Image (cartoon, rainbow, N blue to C red):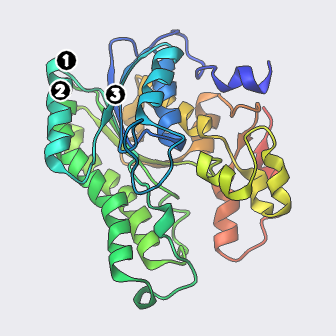
Amino acid sequence: MSEEQNRDKPVPTTDEHPLRGKVALVAGATRGAGRAMAVQLGALGATVYATGRTTRQQVSEVGRTTETIEETAELVTAAGGEGVGVRVDHLEADQVRDLVARIERDHGRLDVLVNDVWGGEHLVEFAKKMWEIDLDRGLRMLELGAKTHIITSHCALPLLLRTGGGLLIEITDGTAEANKPYRESFFYDLTKNAPIRMAFNLSHEVKDAGATALSLTPGFLRSEQMLDHFGVTEENWRDAVAKERHFALSESPVLVGRAVAALAADPDKARWNGASLYSGQVAKEYGFTDTDGTVPDSWPYFQQVMAGEDPGDPEDYRLRP
């Protein structure tokens, strides 16, 4: 099977559409990991509400016009699900409440909530002390990557918990274990650790309702923005390894998308309640790969990098089942 064919292939399951009749909300699905999560949930038959701030008529502060929430919804439908694109600013609680009310009117249920809202890459500054970073810039990062998640969970969890067996996934950068070394930017470190703790805290609060809360991170993600940063495409991404050695262990957004879909389709997902997972770990557990047929086992590698150790050849961490 070619890489292009493998890109759209859903995660392997015994049922071709195990999420048929299920309703998912992917908050922050305009591009990158969020888009891939929405598409892979759709590939397993789910109805997916995909939200974001960039539409064909309106662009968010991220400033990218090439990816829109309408396009994400169309890709979900093309994959086999039902995509519903809704422009929502997840910092505006009334907009999120209206969205949840719409889902309730349309379906009376919510089975999967993925909190992937971010859009703060343009704010990140490394190699600066906390007090050297513009305060408004740092606080905006926290708003985009943490406050949005709190607002969305607060508004959507009552519906998610109604039917039992619901799944909340907090998307972040890093795991509880991997983030023990300082992430070299006060506001970024705080923003990306917050969803991990949110999932852990909520795992205690949703358990009695039969729901599961966990956090999940991709590895070195080949998002549209990252590919543009290196001046490459998904087809020739390896050309960027000469500029950044660690990029050899990068992964496409499809890998974390398949991870979300596999977790959502698992009837025994409750075993992950409170867990902090990464995409390669979930791939090994459920037996799927990235689009190139490999599994980038990224976080064991990057844990060593962040600790100032030499992890060796990144290709040694790209597993070939």
Mark 1 crowd level (few <14, some 14–19, many ≥20, 10 Å Cα): few
Q: Identify the residue at image location x=20%, y=42%.
A: 96
Quarter of the view holding residue 132 = bottom left
Q: Say which quadrant the C terminus sits in.
A: top right
Cα separation between marks 1 and 2 = 6 Å
Among numbered discs 2 and 3, the one appearing first in the sequence: 3
Mark 2 crowd level (few <14, some 14–19, many ≥20, 10 Å Cα): few
Per the image, label 3 sits on a secondary structure element best described as strand
Q: Which residue is identified by label 2?
A: 102
**Are the residues flagged by discs 2 and 3 in contact, CB closer than 8 Å?**
no
Q: Nearer the viewer, mark 1 or mark 3?
A: 1
Question: Nearest the camera: 131 or 307?
Answer: 131
Amino acid type of the residue that numbered disc 1 sits on in the rendered structure: Asp
Per the image, label 1 sits on a secondary structure element best described as helix
**Are the residues flagged by discs 1 and 2 in contact, CB closer than 8 Å?**
yes
Q: Nearer the viewer, mark 2 or mark 3?
A: 2
Q: Which residue is identified by label 3?
A: 24
Q: Which residue is identified by label 1?
A: 106
Residue 223 at least partly seen: no
Cα separation between marks 2 and 3 = 13 Å
Q: Say which quadrant the N terminus sits in.
A: top right
Instruction: Indicate the position of residue 118 as horizontal and vertical percent values.
Output: 41, 54
Instruction: Indicate the position of residue 283 as horizontal and vertical percent values.
Output: 62, 35
Q: Horizontally, is 9 left or right of 264 in the view?
A: right
Cα separation between marks 1 and 3 = 12 Å
Q: Identify the residue at image location x=79%, y=71%.
A: 310
In this view, 161 is above or below 202: above
Among numbered discs 1 and 3, the one appearing first in the sequence: 3
Amino acid type of the residue that numbered disc 2 sits on in the rendered structure: Arg
In this view, 68 is above or below 318: above
